[in-house]
Image (cartoon, rainbow, N blue to C red):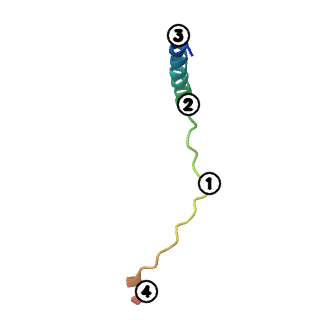
Amino acid sequence: MDTELLIPIFWTVVFGGLLTLGVRKLTKKVPVNKKWVRPEPKKEDPKVMNQ
C-alpha cells in the first residue's frame, strides 16, 4: 500500500471511532428499575439459635 493512502485511512478510523463513541454516549439507555430481585438467602445467626 502507498503511504499516501495510509494517512486518510488512519484518520477515517480515528474519526469514525470518535463518532461511534459520541453516538453511544448520547443515545445511552436510562437504567430501568428491576421488577424482581433475587432474594438473598437468610443466614441464621448462631447466637440467636442458642438462646
Q: Position of residue 49 (x, y in %)?
A: 43, 86
Question: Which amino acid, mark 3?
Answer: Glu
How far apart are labels 4 and 1 at the CA level? Answer: 34 Å
Quick one: quadrant of the N terminus? top right
* Nearest to viewer (mark 2 / mark 4): 2
Q: CA distance from mark 3 to mark 2?
A: 31 Å
Mark closer to the observer (1, 3): 3
Residue 47's image quarter? bottom left
Specify which label sits upstream in the sequence, 2 or 4: 2
* Gap in angstroms between the C-alphas marked 3 and 4: 79 Å
Residue at 42% in and 79% down: 45
Mark in the foreground, 3 or 4: 3
The residue carrying mark 1 is 35
Tags 2 and 1 in contact by the CB under 8 Å rule? Answer: no
In this figure, which residue is indicated by the disc labeled 2?
Answer: 24
Query: Element type at marker 3?
Result: helix
Sooner in the amino-acid sequence: mark 3 or mark 2: 3
Q: Secondary structure at mark 4?
A: helix
Q: Position of residue 22 (x, y in %)?
A: 52, 26
Residue 4's disc number: 3
Between disc 1 and disc 3, whose residue precedes? 3
Between the C-alphas of marks 2 and 1, the distance is 26 Å
Give the farthest residue toward the front.
Answer: 1
For marks 1 and 3, give the CA distance.
56 Å
Q: Residue at x 52, y 10 (%)?
A: 4
Query: Would you call the spot at circle 1 few (<14 residues within 10 Å), some (14-19), or many (20 or more)?
Result: few
Q: Position of residue 6 (x, y in %)?
A: 53, 16
